[in-house]
Amino acid sequence: MSTEKCLSLTSQKKFVMAVINSRTREKGKIIIDYDKCIACGLCVAVCPDKSLEITDGRLHESEKAVFGCIGCGHCMTICPHDAIKIEGRETSGRDLFTLPPANLFPDYDSLYALLSSRRSIRHFKEKEVEQEKIDKILKVASTAPMGIPPSDVQVVVMKGKEKVRAFSEDFAAVLRSSRFIYSLLGSRMMKPFVGKEISELFSNFLNTLVSSYISNMEKGTNKILYDAPLAISFQTTLYTDPADAYIPATYATIAAESLGLGSCMIGGVHPFIKKGAKEFKKKYGILDRFSGGIIVIFGYPKYKYVRGVRRSFKEVKVI
């Protein structure tokens, strides 16, 4: 059967609702090369949506699919005969690459050494971050698991101390215009509506944080993004989980560490602009409406640390 005939069968399958986001509203197209396919069943076994099945020794799309092809690419990356491709949902056979050899993988001790040595860096040398290293950070960050494909994470790169400073000054102005909301009086007034924990967070942390942001900027000291030579904002659309922004941001900090750069996650920006601040968000390319967001600052560390601090979870339960 020809590829064209295979594609025509796709439209005859029962209707299933594709998973949509801001980048796509369609299911992926499954293209099978029957001259290469031996119906080994590997693609059927790994498909998370059960979009494939084998009947009478022949591979074809399944009517048992939940959403239809989500474009994860599992089938075409596992096929030993290169007999299947996915097109659509920002995925293509052109995106395939040969996996690197195992000797390039870090062992556990090497990985732990890198991760345990990383600290949140807020003091940087007066040195720009090279574009080559920015590209490498973004390349690593793009490999992070970010929900059902395609990724709905938007990235904004602020390169240079001047741009980072301008962003911080404008953000301080946004906070200044809505300072009452984060005041101690405001938090007490909101307690019946937001609950004890959120009210305590406002009183004990957010009010102090906002005051510190504003007062320090008025003195010329940037305690928002610390005048870092590079800042990258990660934010997700309303179609996706807020965590999808934080995972690539974490990968970015690991990439920076491997490149000799320091980094620090700044969570004290996006929560304050989730609603309102339309002009500010438009100016800096931030989504007007987002489900989650975080900024990571980068630069060459000004100081060298000689010891680490062990961290722990609140609790580890085995069930």
Image (tube, rainbow, N blue to C red):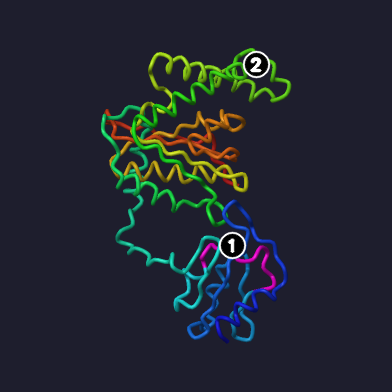
Q: Give the total of numbered labels.
A: 2
Q: Amino acid at mark 2?
A: Gly
Crowding near pointer 1: few (<14 within 10 Å), some, many (20+)? many
Residue 153 position within the rendered picture, expressed as x and y whole percent measured from the top left? 52, 47
Residue 123 position within the rendered picture, expressed as x and y whole percent measured from the top left? 32, 27
Q: Main secondary structure of the magenta part?
A: loop
**Mark before the other along the chain sequence, 2 or 1:** 1
Image side of residue 77 versus residue 129, left or right? right
Query: Callout 2: helix, strand or loop?
Result: helix
The reply to whether the magenta stretch includes residue 66 is yes
Q: Nearer the viewer, residue 8 or 85?
A: 8
Q: Which residue is mark 1?
A: 70
Whether 19 is drawn above or below 163: the answer is below
Q: Nearer the viewer, residue 100 or 87?
A: 87
Q: Amino acid at mark 1?
A: Ile
Q: Which mark is residue 186?
A: 2
Q: Quadrant of the N terminus?
A: bottom right
Residue extent of the magenta highlight: 62-74
Q: Quadrant of residue 12?
A: bottom right
Residue 207 position within the rendered picture, expressed as x and y whole percent measured from the top left? 56, 18
The reply to whether the magenta stretch includes residue 175 is no
Query: Callout 1: helix, strand or loop?
Result: loop
Residue located at (59% from left, 84% from top): 58
Residue located at (62% from left, 31% from top): 275
Residue 184 position within the rendered picture, expressed as x and y whole percent measured from the top left? 61, 14
Crowding near pointer 2: few (<14 within 10 Å), some, many (20+)? some
